[in-house]
């Protein structure tokens, strides 16, 4: 049973240490909306989402007032649209799925949510016709909408890496960057390419409602890098004591998330799914994962020792969090999105943090190369190879990894892209100029690693 007095002990952390609930996300199954007539299908999608989520924002706001806990975003995730669009697409892989994205945007506007995710496809082993149609539609769909997010899973430990999909995503990212070039290629901030994608992730841009999920679920994402840093400021012990301090702090943060999730579930009459333990930073000073690593004793995030410090942080967060909630899922760890973390931004600008170091860090933390800005003239094959590298880390280590990269059209190393809000800003980082074009053009599938044979 939840002890609310224990949860409310953390309220004093809110104003000074940026403690918040990052998101309450409602996952909605759209399987009942499938129609061969796209117009009818879109009508059903709109009706179902707006009916299920009509009270989501109001309930979130009421919980904020009741508990005094900020809930930064209210979001919706839906069944991957490539599945829902299959009947309408038929045998036409050039079928335009953009109207589905426009329907999601319309539903998001009606419900008043911050983001809606699920313009997605799962292609780790191969493509259906509608998968190709959806991926082909991503640039136009995300350029035409504001709050719709997209994800594509190109690899898994069980299936290996679909290199044809990886190459396709390199082209997709580049085209999307061009179509949204007037706003620092912001469309790419709404697209993430995964390996081992979780089906219950409440965080954008990767959220979708997996086929193994219920008809409708509530998933909550917690956050509190500032709280963890503040706790470490009082810790003078060795690294074992540092880990213990983080565990205890993560426990408190997660208990608060569990309370909010339970209240939201009860008030909405929707089953509770999971709490995602991830420490999600913001561009605000004092709300940074990088600053936690520096509090452990690093001169700057990106220095030697950063990967080890991040491994300690990620593990301690998980150990503390799993004791605090009966259902943990999503990504659950420490995020390292460059543009969304004040400390990461500063480290990247100073040169302490490079793409190569970030890639090493992704072997031990949640997600992957997230919100990385690179020169706009970066070839699509280089983008694809970056995705392949990150997918390989996920596949071999049986963990989720992802790439959310922004080839900033018209910009080069040293320039800055700025998106505002939680998306923040990022310096354009150097990426290796040496070509992987022959490797990417081979296509096919990188076989699953031997550790996939666990049956």
Image: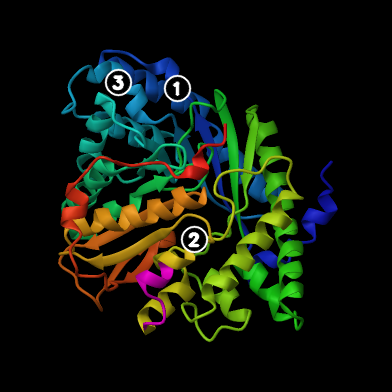
Q: Residue 375 placed where, x, y %?
A: 21, 68
Which of discs 2 and 1 lies nearer the camera? The answer is 2
Q: Determine whether 53 is above or below 259 in the image.
A: above
The reply to whether the magenta stretch includes residue 298 is: no
- Drawn side of residue 8 relative to residue 26, left or right: right
Residue 68 in view in this figure: no
Q: Is residue 125 left or right of residue 245?
A: left
Above-or-below relation of 417 to 65: below
Q: Which mark is residue 86?
A: 3
Quadrant where the N terminus is found in the figure: top right
Q: Residues within 10 Å of mark 1 (few under 14, many from 20)?
A: some
Q: Position of residue 91 (x, y in %)?
A: 19, 18
Q: Regarding mark 1 in the picture, which secondary structure is present there?
A: helix
- Stretch of the chain drawn in magenta: 351-358
Q: Are marks 1 and 3 in contact (CB under 8 Å)?
A: no
* Foreground: disc 3 or disc 2: 2
Residue indicated by mark 2: 363
Name the residue at the front extreme: 450
Could you tell me which residue is drawn at 82 percent across and 44 percent down? 2
Q: Residues within 10 Å of mark 3 (few under 14, many from 20)?
A: many
Q: Is residue 145 visible?
A: yes
Judging from the image, what secondary structure is the residue with disc 3 in?
Answer: helix
Marks 3 and 2 close (CB-CB < 8 Å):
no
Quadrant where the C terminus is found in the figure? top right
**Residue 245 found in image quarter:** bottom right
Report if the CB atoms under discs 2 and 1 are less than 8 Å apart: no
Which residue in the structure is indicated by mark 1? 48
**For numbered disc 2, what is the local secondary structure?**
loop
Q: CA distance from mark 3 to mark 2?
A: 35 Å
For the residue pair 452 and 119, the one nearer the viewer reads as: 452
């Amino acid at each position: 049973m939840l002890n609310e007095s224990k949860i409310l002990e953390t309220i004093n952390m809110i104003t000074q240490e940026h403690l918040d609930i990052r998101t309450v996300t409602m996952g909605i199954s759209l399987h009942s909306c499938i129609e061969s007539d796209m117009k009818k299908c879109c009508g059903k999608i709109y009706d179902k989402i707006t009916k299920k989520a009509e009270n989501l924002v109001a309930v979130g706001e009421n919980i904020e007032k009741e508990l005094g806990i900020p809930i930064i975003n209210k979001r919706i995730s839906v069944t991957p649209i490539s599945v829902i669009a299959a009947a309408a697409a038929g045998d036409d892989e050039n079928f335009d799925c953009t109207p589905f994205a426009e329907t999601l945007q319309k539903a998001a506007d009606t419900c008043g949510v911050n983001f809606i995710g699920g313009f997605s496809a799962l292609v780790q082993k191969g493509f259906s016709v509608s998968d190709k149609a959806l991926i082909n539609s991503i640039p136009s769909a995300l350029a035409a909408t504001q709050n719709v997010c997209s994800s594509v899973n190109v690899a898994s430990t069980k299936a290996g890496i679909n290199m044809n999909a990886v190459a396709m995503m390199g082209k997709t990212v580049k085209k999307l960057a061009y179509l949204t070039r007037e706003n620092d290629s912001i469309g790419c901030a709404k697209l993430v390419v995964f390996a081992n994608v979780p089906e219950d992730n409440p965080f954008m841009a990767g959220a979708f409602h997996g086929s193994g999920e219920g008809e409708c679920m509530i998933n909550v994402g917690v956050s509190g890098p500032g709280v963890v840093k503040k706790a470490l400021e009082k810790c003078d012990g060795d690294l074992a004591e540092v880990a213990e301090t983080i565990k205890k702090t993560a426990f408190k943060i997660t208990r608060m998330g569990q309370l909010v999730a339970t209240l939201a579930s009860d008030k909405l009459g929707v089953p509770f799914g999971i709490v995602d333990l991830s420490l999600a930073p913001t561009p605000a000073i004092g709300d940074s994962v990088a600053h936690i690593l520096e509090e452990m004793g690093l001169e700057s995030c990106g220095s030697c020792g950063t990967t080890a410090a991040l491994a300690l942080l990620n593990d301690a967060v998980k150990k503390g969090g799993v004791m605090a909630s009966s259902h943990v899922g999503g990504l659950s760890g420490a995020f390292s999105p460059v543009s969304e973390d004040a400390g990461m931004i500063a480290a990247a600008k100073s040169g302490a943090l490079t793409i190569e170091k970030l890639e090493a860090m992704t072997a031990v933390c949640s997600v992957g190369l997230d919100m990385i800005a690179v020169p706009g003239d970066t070839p699509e094959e280089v983008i694809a190879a970056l995705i392949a590298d990150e997918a390989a880390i996920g596949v071999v280590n049986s963990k989720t990894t992802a790439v959310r990269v922004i080839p900033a059209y018209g910009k080069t190393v040293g320039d800055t892209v700025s998106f505002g809000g939680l998306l923040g800003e990022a310096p354009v980082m150097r990426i290796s100029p040496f070509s992987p074009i022959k490797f990417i053009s081979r296509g096919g599938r990188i076989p699953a690693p031997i550790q996939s044979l666990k049956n």
